[in-house]
Image: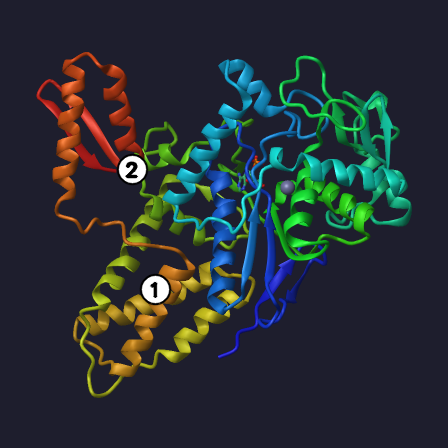
Amino acid sequence: MKQTVFVYNTLTRTKEEFIPLDAPYVGMYVCGPTVYSDAHLGNARTYISFDLIFRYLTHLGYKVRYVRNITDAGHLESDADFGEDKISKKAKLAQLEPMEIVQKYSTGFHDVMREFNVLPPSIEPTATGHIIEQIELVKIMLDNGFAYEVNGSVYFDVEKYNSTNDYGVLSGRHLEDLLNNTRTLGGQDEKHGKLDFALWIKAKPEHLMKWPSPWSVGFPGWHLECSAMSHKYLGEQFDIHGGGIDLIPTHHTNEVAQNHACYGKNPAKYWIHTNMLTVNGQKMSKSLGNSFLPHELFSGDNTILNKGYSPMTVRFFMLQAHYRSTLDFSNDAMEASEKGFKRLMNAYTLLDGLQASSQSEVEIQPLLNQCYEALNDDFNSPILIAELFEASRIINSVHDGKLKIDATNLELLKTLMQTFVTDVLGLKNEQTSSDELPKVIDFIVNLRSEAKTNRDYATSDKIRDGLQKVGFQLKDSKEGTTWNKI
Ligand code: AMP
Ligand code: ZN
């Protein structure tokens, strides 16, 4: 059956019909992480939400070109145009080369994405790999009269742009309000207007990551990279642009302005924004000190947590909320999700052993239709999960001999679970099927004990941390070392 997807578009503030299935491809660009520290659980929520969208559109038969960048230069501490570059600052503190920081946290980010079963994007470009393209955009904006140079830095002229365009088109705010609510901040002396933002910043001598340009040896402004990379891989206008709602007022607003200034177009037809993961109602963020890392959640090793939860439990917890609602983290909510996830997966495992009867007391097609309807309505995963619990109830009743199902409906039920639990929600059973695994873990634990005996504590710690990362916790005592699955 042909499915029609409706998407809430931040740009128009309405739900709109998505492009037809026979379109050549869907271009989707999502702002990636700034790799100066570990990705926290809030970041993971945003990427899990876009993973659902990517998976569902792909399932429907769309050819999705999904571009998710890595920000490895140009993102200053303040999110505005002052302060130090986040990566350079970390590199100085750790006495490392900035690209060592980039490598470490990019690898860590990929590990976390893999744990959460988030599919890799089709293209993952980096800001540092696209300096030439960014310089080209600055040249176009200067030529088109939307930018100006002062002492080797180049700024975007927001008020001039707003005289022919609507700067607040995405945020829904008027320029006058924005001007009234903007304080004068550092670096403003070079700017003509309070809202102007940097496209190219002349580097101070101590700045570590810098490149030659026609204006100075310097580095690009944060917003520029996404305009440059989305244009390079998806063209002047593509279908979906996404990120968290916190990116709307500055990063995405400035990106829209840059694209209009270069190509006279909004880069995306649909802007999709995910809401925030909160803790006690407050946005989870590094700067507020209320963030924790996915591996702390898996191990339970954080004072906020009563215990650890598996990656798939966390993914399920995230998907139980609609991506446009806030989601508040709590131990109670996590425990409820753990129970719900187990209930769903237990039913899933029973499915293979179910026997078909000659008659059916249940029809699966309406339920399957409702699953599609849920996701067609702006990717409503909580409603989908409610339908999957109904499917689980049917599975359990058939298993208990309380309900009869015929072969056709049983096949449909299998298709429904495979499609929506595995392919679209990206959930998988975490119980290990291998009997050999405990023996392998015992073997590794013994190796670690040998290392400890040899006072090779670096290796011993490495093994303990490595096992922790893949979900096994070690406990040392006088009697020796024991382990358990987290
Ligand atoms: P950053 O690495 O800080 O640029 O953030 C990467 C992505 O995570 C962006 O799309 C942010 O909007 C998103 N993000 C940051 N904090 C949260 C949060 N608490 N909940 C959901 N998404 C978040
Ligand atoms: Zn971006």
| Residue 263 horizontal/vertical position (percent) | 80, 51
- The quarter holding residue 357 reads bottom left
Ligand 1: quadrant of the figure: top right
Q: Nearer the viewer, residue 130 or 41?
A: 130
Q: Residue 347 location, x and y as percent?
A: 25, 63
Label 1: few (<14), some (14–19) or many (≥20) C-alpha neighbours in 10 Å: some
Q: Is residue 101 left or right of residue 167?
A: left
In the displayed structure, 162 sits above or below 305; it is below
Q: Which color scheme is applied?
A: rainbow
- Pinpoint residue 441: horizontal percent, then vertical percent: 17, 35
Amino acid type at circle 1 is Phe
Q: Which mark is residue 200?
A: none
Q: Earlier in the sequence, mark 2 or mark 1?
A: 1
Task: Let me know if residue 290 appears in the view.
Answer: no
Quarter of the image where the C terminus is located: top left
CA gap, disc 2 to disc 1? Answer: 29 Å
Residue 470 bears which disc, if any?
Answer: 2
Q: Relative to residue 410, is residue 127 depicted above or below? A: above
Which residue is rendered at x = 71% and y = 32% of the image? 221
**Disc 1 target residue:** 389
Q: 52 left or right of 378?
A: left
